[in-house]
Amino acid sequence: MAAQRLGTLLVAVPGLSGTTYPPGTTVTVRGRGATVDAFVNGDWLPLCWWEFSDGLREDIADR
């Protein structure tokens, strides 16, 4: 199993379920490189490098 880390969405991203997650949402990220797999409560979000930030950013939703 790939190592997991937490990240924060920088833009709104739709999940496989059809739910759109807003900037500031905490995601569990798997993988490295230009694209990664991210999950929110089991919902899969394929992310590009510019759609998320590694780690948690409490202030991102306020921007």
Image (cartoon, grey):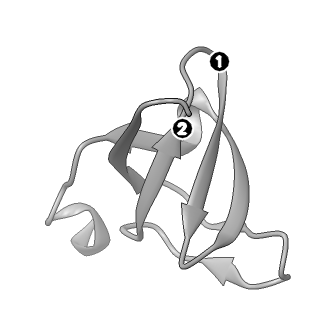
| Distance from Cα at disc 2 to Cα at disc 1 | 12 Å
Q: Amino acid at mark 1?
A: Ala
Is 5 positioned to the left or the right of 28 in the image? left
Is 5 positioned to the left or the right of 43 in the image? left
Q: Position of residue 34 (x, y in %)?
A: 65, 18
Q: Quadrant of the C terminus?
A: bottom left
3, 11: nearer the viewer: 3
Q: Amino acid at mark 2?
A: Arg
Figure disc tally:
2
63, 4: nearer the viewer: 4
Q: Quadrant of the N terminus?
A: top right
Seen in the picture, residue 45 relative to 36 is either above or below; the reply is below
62, 58: nearer the viewer: 58
Q: Quadrant of residue 40?
A: bottom right
Q: Position of residue 60 (x, y in %)?
A: 26, 61
Residue at which label 2 appears: 30
Q: Which mark is residue 34?
A: 1
Q: Quadrant of residue 21?
A: bottom right
Which residue: 56% across, 27% down? 31
Badge 2 marks a residue whose secondary structure is strand
Q: Position of residue 62 (x, y in %)?
A: 23, 73
Task: Report the mark closest to the observer, 2 or 1.
Answer: 2
